[in-house]
Amino acid sequence: MSANDGVEGGLPGRSASQLDGVDRAIIAELLRDGRISMRTLAERVHISRANVYARITRLMDDGVITGFTAELAPHKAGLGTSAYVSVTIEQNSWRTVSARLRETPYVEHFAMVGGDYDVLVLVRTPDNEVLRHVVLERIQDIPGVRATRTWLVFEEARGRGTEWAARES
């Protein structure tokens, strides 16, 4: 087996699944409208409903599609304060820190990162008082957390993301 076998685009060191044009078109349509019916999806990607069901099942089994969810407007949903919190942790404490962050209310997303900090956390709360509580009493209280730095988010926008239907594998 060569270093390029099973790797999209033939780039070594990547572990992306092989997706054909139909898979990419399905993903593009689901990202555009996660509530699309299987019938409409089949019509849009020009395959049978049975094939759509089979492909979506395979994409889920392969872990490419990990779930379906609603997108919320945080401010309209009562979460008027957003902040990124950088966290510096002790060496070998990632498992403990990540487990505790998963359980922490108002933590929307977090990632281990390279650079000046170890973990970047997106926190969305109703107001600054709750944000203060989350950062100072919840995150800083996690064993292994050495320091935090908080940046308030004043405005957000989505980028273009990946053009799923644009390229063939």
Image (tube, rainbow, N blue to C red):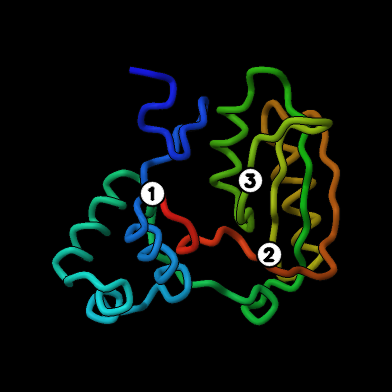
The quarter of the picture where residue 153 lies is bottom right
Label whose residue precedes the other's in the sequence (3 or 2): 3
Say whether residue 43 is left or right of residue 73: left
Q: Return the x and y of residue 30 as percentages of the image width and height.
A: 40, 69
How many residues crowd around disc 1 within 10 Å: few (fewer than 14), some, or many (20 or more)?
some
Q: Which mark is residue 110?
A: 3
The type of residue carrying mark 1 is: Val
Secondary structure at numbered mark 1: loop
Q: Return the x and y of residue 40 as percentages of the image width and height.
A: 28, 81
Q: Nearer the viewer, mark 1 or mark 3?
A: 1
Residue nearer the viewer, 21 or 103: 21
Secondary structure at numbered mark 2: loop
Contact (CB < 8 A) between labels 1 and 3? no
Q: Nearer the viewer, mark 3 or mark 2?
A: 2
Q: CA distance from mark 1 to mark 3?
A: 20 Å
The quarter of the picture where residue 55 lies is bottom left
Q: From this view, report whether residue 77 is shown above or below residue 161.
A: below
Q: CA distance from mark 3 to mark 2?
A: 19 Å
Give the residue number, with chain letter if any, for mark 1. 64
Residue plotted at (54% across, 46% down): 103
The type of residue carrying mark 3 is: Phe
Q: Return the x and y of residue 168 as percentages of the image width and height.
A: 42, 54
Residue plotted at (81% across, 70% down): 155
Secondary structure at numbered mark 3: strand
The quarter of the picture where residue 131 lies is bottom right
Give the residue number, with chain letter if any, for mark 2. 159
Residue plotted at (63% across, 76% down): 73
Residue plotted at (36% across, 43% down): 18
Say whether residue 59 is left or right of residue 78: left
Say whether residue 152 is left or right of residue 35: right
